[in-house]
Image (cartoon, helix red, strand yellow):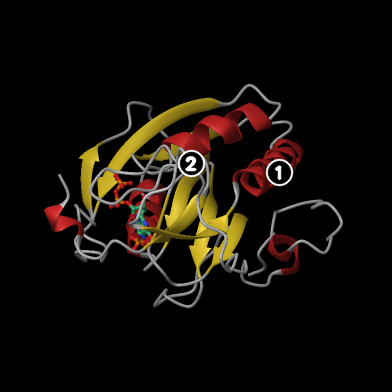
Amino acid sequence: MSAVAGPVDEPEPSAAPWRTGLPVARRPGCLPEPPWDDPSLGELIVPADELQARIADLGAAIARHYADRPPLLVGVLKGACIFLSDLARAIGLPVEMDFMAISSYGSATRTSGVVRIVKDLDIDLTGRHVLIVEDIVDSGLTLSFLTRNLLARNPASLEVCALLVKEGLQATSLDLAYEGFRIPPEFVVGYGLDVAERFRNLPFICEYRGGDPAGLS
Ligand SMILES: O=P(O)(O)OC[C@H]1O[C@H](OP(=O)(O)OP(=O)(O)O)[C@H](O)[C@@H]1O
Ligand code: HPA
């Protein structure tokens, strides 16, 4: 699986790390700036402008692949809400959207190992071209649960677009049609990703250094 794999016609690779398949390098010493500075936040992992540029490319690749069969985007709440909002606007097709809320982390920084559907889809997937939109693949448990669950609903096709994939943490191999960035195996927040519901509205992705979030108010 490549970091920029798409079913068709990806743009020519450039020197940017997310196009070469290399892990996105941490920005040494580059910390979030006011008003986003916070002592529990560490170094920047993906700056806001790189997120937006990559999402524009993903949107274009998705639009090419689904040109004659606009997909149903299935957003995985809550983490994917911001990614899906930007991605949907980068796909120049009349997409539809539905949402599923799935939780396995609670307020912790490690998966509980138990994936729970908190809210199911409203739309019947039978015969639909479904694109799952995920914010992050970490252990891979959520995605593996979700693909099995949605395949059982008889879609015409089922693909995955994940913004972030943590390097080397998945027990089984992944089948991702679209991937944004490979990131180091550390807990990250921002751009939809939270710890105990905090930091989802950061416009970038950064390392979380705050320790056990249980005491957060
Ligand atoms: O690959 P995994 O180890 O399964 O982790 C990935 C999942 O974890 C997060 O969801 P979370 O359970 O934290 O819920 P949230 O999206 O509401 O924050 C994230 O949004 C993914 O859905
Ligand atoms: O690194 C992460 N940050 C926030 N939420 C997550 N869910 C899985 N991994 C992560």
The residue singled out by tag 2 in the image is 34
Residue 75, placed above or below residue 175:
above
Q: Does residue 75 appear in the picture of this structure?
A: yes
Could you tell me which residue is drawn at 69 percent across and 61 percent down?
18
Residue neighbourhood size for the residue with mark 2, other residues' Cα within 10 Å, grouped as few (<14), some (14–19), many (≥20): few
Quadrant for residue 52, please give it. Answer: top right
Question: Which disc is residue 139 wearing?
Answer: none
Quadrant for residue 210, please give it. Answer: bottom left
Between 159 and 110, the one lying in front of the other is: 110
Q: Does residue 69 appear in the picture of this structure?
A: no
Could you tell me which residue is drawn at 23 percent across and 48 percent down?
196
Which quadrant would the C terminus be assigned to in this image? top left
Residue 134 is situated, as x and y percent measured from the top left of the image, at: 46, 48
Q: Is mark 2 within 8 Å of ligand 2?
A: no
Residue 74 is situated, as x and y percent measured from the top left of the image, at: 45, 37
Between 204 and 157, the one lying in front of the other is: 204
